Image (cartoon, rainbow, N blue to C red):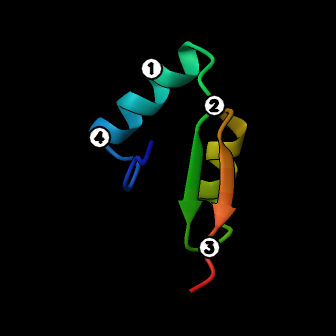
Amino acid sequence: MIIPGAGGVGRTVFEHLRAQDVPVRFMVRREDERAAELRALGAEVVISVT
C-alpha cells in the first residue's frame, strides 16, 4: 500500500492500518524529524535514492 505524503487522508489510513497491526512502509526523500516520527509510530521507513 502506498500512502502519499501521509498527510490528511493518508495519515488516517496509516493510523487505521497500524491499529490492526498491519505493517506499513513509507518511502521518504530524506532522513528528518518526520521520518523519525513515522518510525516512532511503528512504520518502516525507507530513504529514496534518486
The mark lying in front, picked from 2 and 1, is: 2
Query: On screen, 8 above or below 28?
Result: above
Please say if the residues under marks 1 and 3 sit with CB atoms less than 8 Å apart. Answer: no
Please say if the residues under marks 2 and 3 sit with CB atoms less than 8 Å apart. Answer: no
* Element at label 4: loop
Residue lying at the far top in this picture: please name it: 20
Residue lying at the far left in this picture: please name it: 9
Q: Nearer the viewer, residue 23 or 8?
A: 23
Mark before the other along the chain sequence, 2 or 3: 2
Residue 48 screen position, x and y as percent:
60, 73
Q: Which residue is mark 3?
A: 30
Q: Which residue is mark 4?
A: 8
Q: Which residue is mark 1?
A: 16
Q: Residue at x 45, y 42 (%)?
A: 1
Mark 4: amino acid: Gly
Q: Residue at x 63, y 31 (%)?
A: 23
Mark before the other along the chain sequence, 2 or 4: 4
Mark 2: amino acid: Pro
Q: Which residue is mark 2?
A: 23
Left or right placement of residue 20 versus residue 14 in this view: right
Spatial distance from mark 3 to mark 4, Cα to Cα? 20 Å
